[in-house]
Amino acid sequence: MITVATWNVLHRVHADNYANEIAAQWPVEAERIAAVTGVVARRSERVVALQEVSGDQLASLRAALPTSTFHTLRYPRIPNPRRIASVLAERAEYLVLIVDGPGKEVAAASFATDPGKGALAVEVEGVLVVATHVTGDFRRDGQFADLAALAATAPAVLLGDFNADRATVGAALGAAFTVAGLAPDSQPTRPRTDGAKSQFIDHVVVRGIAAHDAVVEDVAGTSDHNLVRAIVG
């Protein structure tokens, strides 16, 4: 059994570009970065997958978790401020897997259709763990195909922001994959006050193993996504 978690921590440039409510709630990004790091540092899962990690956020996490193993994918696209100047020292965006113990990196690449999204795969205790962030438009079909090919050999678990609801993800990846279900009264993984997009777009997906006790945890307004945790094996 391996405990896992996934969380989109919200890159500050994206928050500012889209006037995200989190940016208004946290006018000092250094304080939000410290709060996000605090949330992650208190986690007990063996593997934590993070999306939209800025260079500043990554540095903070590394400093707070010196004994953890960090696997990272630095996207070739660097978020570009469009509304206001960025306060970040390093605007680069990363996909991150934090492992308590050893892990062997297997693959790390952005998607061919989006240089700001991708997949990072690490073998942990014989299980292929894939962190991913999928584009939220027509490009996701090809990206789902890439993910299914990457995790073609079981056992595997995919963790990330899929920008799609559970049924869509399951259908796109195929019958060999199972998207962990949540309780009917679960809080959303991506709360929204308007719009037609699903509020459940962050998932734990398994192939060849089972997922148990999938739960969404509130992150106290430090990001526009909540954290999802589960046990796989």
Image: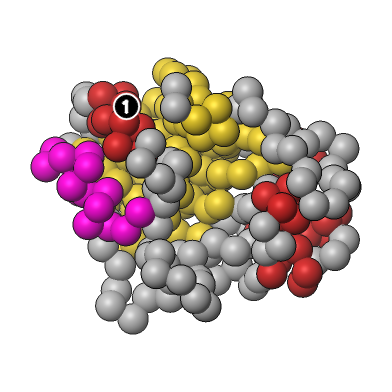
The x and y percentages for residue 88 are 84, 43
For this view, does 197 lie left or right of residue 92?
left
Please give the range of residues in magenta.
Answer: 164-178
- From the image, tell me which residue sits under label 1: 146
Q: Is residue 192 above or below residue 90?
A: below
- What colour scheme has been applied to the protein in the rendered image? secondary structure
The x and y percentages for residue 223 are 64, 62
Residue at 78% over, 60% down: 32
**Can residue 49 be seen in this snapshot?**
yes
Quick one: label 1, few (<14), some, or many (20+) residues within 10 Å? some
Comparing 125 with 185, the one in front is 185
Residue at 40% over, 64% down: 197
For this view, does 68 lie left or right of residue 135?
right
For this view, does 120 lie left or right of residue 176?
right
Label 1 residue SS: helix
Residue at 43% over, 75% down: 187
**Can residue 71 be seen in this snapshot?**
no
Quarter-wise, where is residue 138 in the image? top left
The x and y percentages for residue 214 are 34, 62
Asked if the stretch drawn in magenta spans residue 35, the answer is no
Comparing 145 with 176, the one in front is 145
Comparing 122 with 56, the one in front is 56
Query: Which quarter of the rendering shows the C terminus?
Result: top left
Query: Which quarter of the rendering shows the N terminus?
Result: top left
Q: Amino acid at mark 1?
A: Asp
Quarter-wise, where is residue 212 in the image? bottom left
Q: Is residue 168 above or below residue 89?
A: below
